[in-house]
Image: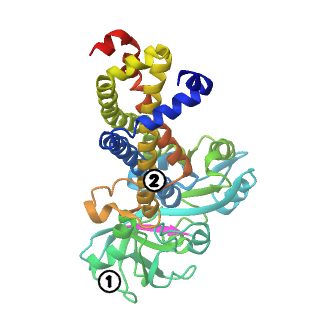
Amino acid sequence: MTGKYRKGGTAALITIAYRNIWRNKRRTIFCFIAVGLAVFFIVVYSSMIEGMVKSINDTVQIYELGHIRAVSSQYDAESEYMPVQFPVAINDGGKEITNWNEIAARIKSVPGVNAVFPRITTMATLQDSTIKHAVLWGIDIENEMRQNNFNMTYRTDGLIKGRWPEPGANECVIGHVFAQKSGFEVGDRITFKTISAQFSEKFLSPRITGIFNFDYIKIDEQYIILDFERLQRLLVLDDAAQSIIIYTDDDKKSAAVTAEVQKILGENNIVTDWQDNYWVAMMRMMGPLYTLIFLVFLIVASFLIINTVVMIIHERIKEIGMMGCLGMTRTEIVKVFFFESVFMAAIGALIGVIAGGLIAGVGSFFPFRMGDLYGNTFSEMPMSNAIFFRLSPMILLRSWLLGVVIASLFTLIPSLKSAFVEPVEALRR
């Protein structure tokens, strides 16, 4: 036996360890379940968190900043009031340029810029409505709809009734929650008052041509969308834009484009990279915390393997003595018990990866609807109501490796215990 074992070396030790884990199937299955559950939760929660991060990133890029947003420094200082009297403007040799098309042409000359759009966002007071206040959102509807899917859940433009306003027409669309609360339908006129760039009161009664559902409660509940040029004329902005939204070829490399755009627009304007958004930055900083939580899951699960290995060593004390008498060194005995731990961790982690991958895979096609479960608790966070799990091979591989490495490392100490059992003393027990 000793000769055959010596000839096999480490491979023989691995074979012995694998056979040993099935000697007490009940205990081994408990270890599989413990590690498997920990890895299962890591896969599921990792996929859900990555889905939340993607939802926040997409929401910020589509509705708020694009990849880059440019506003005047005066607007930035008073942005909570959504003022329209501070349009984006650049100084060209002492001449102020406010024409957004001319500014956009200069921005498009920057390498990496894919598209440039104007936007206006301002407050309105509604007349003859149960809802008294709303947000007017002026966008280049036709071109922006080509750039983005405004309903991220179904990958559509979000329109569920009617049609979008015609360019320059006295028409608008409203969110489905807004329509339910106010009682407005397609074909009705909605009258509101707003303040122009000249601080004069402006009244408008556009006809509602459509109702949208972006699956983003903030906009579905509060926004009235008009054609940019129509709102631009109403607010007496002439040819200016309150903000300019820029999309790049690669959102991960938008920082370099942001720096170039800032040079073009000058210090009187604030150019913001989407990656500097508060919520985006916060989720990025939370990454290490989530990893720490996952490690706690694994460490707790690893204690079952530790206890199992300790029990195995106690129950097989005579066997350990026999191994020593047959010529196995202490190092080789430790390897046998350590390999047993690795097998239990690896198989348990694989079970967890498969189960977690199935759940996360289903969640990648069928969204987890946070708003339906928790109401509007998360309405202040820029995140779609529907969160898709984001499953990737990297998540599965990382979760499996975490399970194997952590659980195996935590069994080193009980495995080393087997090396200090004296063969003669072990055989006497």
Q: What amino acid type should be assigned to the residue bearing mark 1?
A: Phe
Q: Is residue 252 above or below residue 288?
A: below
Compared with 221, 90 (above or below) is above
> Which image quarter: residue 287?
top left
State whether residue 93 is above or below residue 62.
Answer: above
Residue density around tag 1, few if under 14, some if 14–19, many if 20 or more, within 10 Å: some
Colouring scheme applied when the structure was drawn: rainbow
Q: Which residue is mark 2?
A: 354
- N-terminal of the two: label 2 or label 1? 1
Above or below residue 268? Residue 412 is: above
Q: Which of the two discs, 2 and 1, sits closer to the camera?
A: 2
Q: In this rendered view, identify the residue nearer to me: 98 or 299.
A: 299
- List x then y, in percent, for residue 160: 43, 81
Q: Mark 2: which secondary structure?
A: helix
Residue at (41%, 14%) from the top-left corner?
Answer: 419
Which secondary structure, mark 1? loop
Residue at (59% x, 75% y) in the render: 142
Classify residue 174 as left or right of residue 144: left
Q: Main secondary structure of the magenta part?
A: strand
**Magenta residues (range):** 135-139
Residue at (52, 25) in percent of width and height: 1
Q: Amino acid at mark 2?
A: Ile
Can the viewer see residue 85 in this picture? Answer: no
**Crowdedness of circle 2 by 10 Å Cα count: few (<14), some, many (20+)?**
some
Q: Are the two marked residues, 2 and 1, in contact with CB atoms closer than 8 angstroms?
A: no
Q: Position of residue 370 (x, y in %)?
A: 33, 60
Tag 1 residue? 184
